[in-house]
Image (spheres, rainbow, N blue to C red):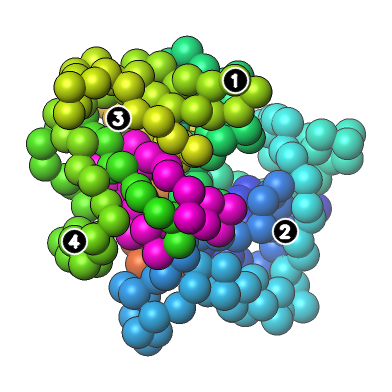
Amino acid sequence: MKDVAIIGLGCAGYTAAVYTARYKLDTVIVGEVEGGMGMNAADVGNWPGEIEIKGPDLMQKYKDHALSFDNVELVSGRVEKVEEGFKLTMQNGDVIEAKAVIFATGSNKRHLGVPGEEEFSGKGVSYCATCDAFFYRDKTVAVLGGGDSAIEGAAITAQVAKTVYLIHRRGEFRAEPYWIDKLNERDNVEFVLNTNVVEILGDQKVTGVKLDTPWKDSDTIELDGVFIEVGSIPAVDIAVQMGCELDDRGHVKVDAALNTTVKGVFAAGDVSGGSNHFAQFATAAGEGAVAANSAFHYLQSGK
């Protein structure tokens, strides 16, 4: 039996593992996607100590640090359920037992929910502009959204695409000024604001989008690809199945020590509301450290 099972291979999970290892706790860290959402970050300019670093490179550093300890084991795979006790049942049928659990399951990309989206997924519809921009060199694409991921994605895509349409349902952006400034440096970006995409058009692959408000006297824009960057949804399914309560924004409810409403279960990173829902590398790492500290004290108490 392990002392701690950490579910999630992202920033919060790896950081928690570094701390549990230093507390001499026998630790297993489990997940499907190594690096989590951090793998989608093309350029990270707000991680202290690194003026600029690629997301995948930063996540590799996290992983290497966590696995540098002899008492940390990484298991790659999907956790299907966690039962009281705690017993983690993997998709392949394997069972892992632990005395405490830290949920660091992160979040999943939010879908738009319009006709054509699912039909053309992988055929011109993508949920990661920074991942797939390379495939649209000298093409015309749209990025949908107004937050950090959308603005960063549009700025990165504009480096290779012929034209980028940034389509946002509001007239203002919620992204960091840094990325807005980067985007404004590009002269091949068209801003389509106060507008929603109501359908993704195509024939075998994406050919354009239909808008709810005419833009330049047309309710359609011809495109080669569409990047949907409209936010994310916390991955709470297993936590809910265990009985963990959610907060009013759908994240796992935690207290200041990152205790969930289930004794011996903690939550850190994008899946929790512990940092005022401010999803950043720095806050995820901080929560991972706090959750590990709380798990250590929980196990020390013998409760």
Amino acid type, callout 3: Arg
Residue 256 appears anywhere in the view: no
Counting residues from the start of the chain, the first of labels 2 and 1 encountered is 2
Contact (CB < 8 A) between labels 2 and 1? no
Q: CA distance from mark 3 to mark 4?
A: 32 Å
- Report x, y in % for residue 90: 80, 38
* Element marked by disc 3: loop
**x then y, percent, for residue 265:** 53, 43
Q: Which mark is residue 203?
A: 1
Q: Which residues are magenta?
A: 134-159
Single out the residue that lies furthest toward the top.
Answer: 115
Q: Name the kind of residue labelled 1 in the image.
A: Asp
Taking 138 as reference, is 224 above or below it?
above
Q: CA distance from mark 2 to mark 3?
A: 29 Å
Disc nearer the start of the sequence (3/1) = 1
Report the residue marked by disc 2. 28
What residue sits 70% from the left and 30% below the top?
81
The question of residue 152 being in magenta is answered with yes
Task: Decide if residue 53 is on the left or right side of residue 20.
Answer: left
Q: Which residue is under mark 3?
A: 249
Q: Earlier in the sequence, mark 1 or mark 4?
A: 4
Residue 103 lies in the magenta-colored region: no
